[in-house]
Amino acid sequence: MSQTDKRTAYRAKLLTFVGDPATTAGGACFEEDGLLIVEDGRVVAAGSYSALRERLTPDTTLVEWRGKLIAPGFIDTHVHYPQTEMIASPAAGLLPWLDTYTFPTERGFADPEHASNVAEFFLDQLLACGTTTALTYCTVHKSSADALFKASEARNLRMVAGKVLMDRNCPEFLRDTAQSGYDDSAELIDRWHKQGRQLYALTPRFAPTSTPAQLEACGALARLHPDVFIQSHVSENTDEVKWVAELFPGHRSYLDVYEHYGLLRRRAVYGHCIYLDDYDRARMAETGAVASHCPTSNLFLGSGLFDFDKAGQAKMPVTLGTDVGGGTSFSMLQTMNEAHKVARMTGHHLTAARMFWLATAGAAQALGLEDTVGTLRPGSEADFIVLDPEATPLLARRTGLAQSPEEWLFAFAMLGDDRAVQETYAAGKRVHRRA
Ligand code: GUN
Ligand code: ZN
């Protein structure tokens, strides 16, 4: 019997969610002495050890992790796998960074072997950080998406990815056309969307690098495939916002460009969302489009500060993204750390419970994947992580003095990174173990 088929129970502290801790009392469920039972790649049960111990049948393997924490695998809603090797490349803001580092780096993905090599390394990094689902950009090359999906399928991961659409305002060697971008995306949807655990995302890079004809074609494809994801960037940087106003005159706002082409809807995920106005935020909420807040990137590139209060007032769905290589870490714990500081800069307090929600169940709900991943609910795919409160001497001291689950989790969010992730599981199978 393979590891995924057998019934296995894990005894540890558990963290799962039934609602957003910011708006639902008891939204976060913390079990001090918990049991997670997994079979055939899915969660069978999760709860207190005392309530579930009678379900430990003689054929169940019991794994003892007392003192550790089992949480749902992290969901990174905005990352660029081709930018893995160019992480930590400094520039004076977004647009020079794209020209100086990003476009030359993405050129290399015309070579499928290079793409496969980076895709494997990228997935190793995600899993080492406890990220089991990511919405990842590929490059303009169709084969770059094939490389990522193949690598993900081989590990049975639930990944969302798409070929970048880009037919202007970038080097010639990275351009598709409205027609070829449409055809390639349609072919990739046929090949990969819902192929095992793989999901497709239409990926117009951002409005400046697509002609109106390309956005029109993308919108048409989105209408044909209502359950396909859409991912792009919006309102990240003031120079970018000005540029969009010049390129698309007559639109109320940057976000309105996407709305005009039918690209605001459920399962549409927009990176950054810093310079939205209240009307934009309301449109995001009304259409079910999702914001991906990428704090390490926004600080690194000096883009600006995401406004959690305004997002909350508008009921705009918010998630967290690393945005590597603009972001400076693959770790969603480090991303929580920076999100907390960004929130503080606008007078907002992000609790640890909320940050873990944003990185797991909240993201799954925003993406329409709440029955699939993001919690430890029975029936969910068993994508989960084991966090070690004694991963470093400092983390051990701080967690040892925590007076509440909130304080204990907060220490992980401030002090944790890949070192805190002891093991990572996808569909019930171990896919990473800390050295
Ligand atoms: N806007 C357009 N492309 C990109 C990108 O690759 N990274 C970031 N952070 N912003 C973008
Ligand atoms: Zn990005």
Image (cartoon, helix red, strand yellow):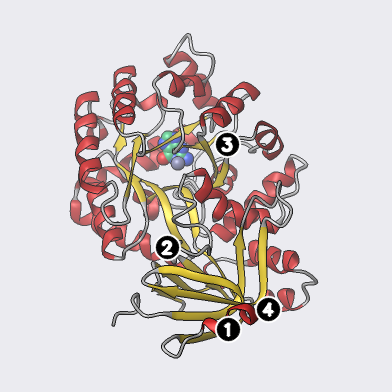
Q: Depth check: give the residue in front, 59 or 106.
A: 59
Badge number at residue 381: 2
Which of the two labelled residues, at mark 2 and mark 4, occupies the earlier sequence position?
2
Label 4 sits on residue: 396
- SS category of the residue bearing label 3: loop
Within 8 Å of ligand 1, the CB of disc 3?
yes
Number of other residues with Cα within 10 Å of mark 3, as a class: few under 14, some 14 to 19, many 20 or more: many
- SS category of the residue bearing label 4: helix
Look at 27% across and 60% down and name the residue there: 153
Label 3 sits on residue: 303
Look at 43% across and 14% down and name the residue there: 248
Q: Is residue 254 above or below residue 94?
A: above
Q: Nearer the viewer, mark 1 or mark 4?
A: 1
Contact, mark 3 vs mark 2 (Cβ under 8 Å): no
Examine the image and state in which quarter residue 106 appears: top left
Q: Nearer the viewer, mark 3 or mark 2?
A: 2
The CA span between labels 2 and 4 is: 30 Å
In this rendering, position of residue 347 left or right of residue 199: right
Label 1 sits on residue: 53
Give the amino acid at mark 4: Ala
Q: Nearer the viewer, mark 1 or mark 3?
A: 1
Examine the image and state in which quarter residue 395 appears: bottom right
Give the amino acid at mark 3: Ser
Q: Depth check: give the residue in front, 346 or 93.
A: 346
The CA span between labels 1 and 4 is: 29 Å
The CA span between labels 1 and 2 is: 22 Å
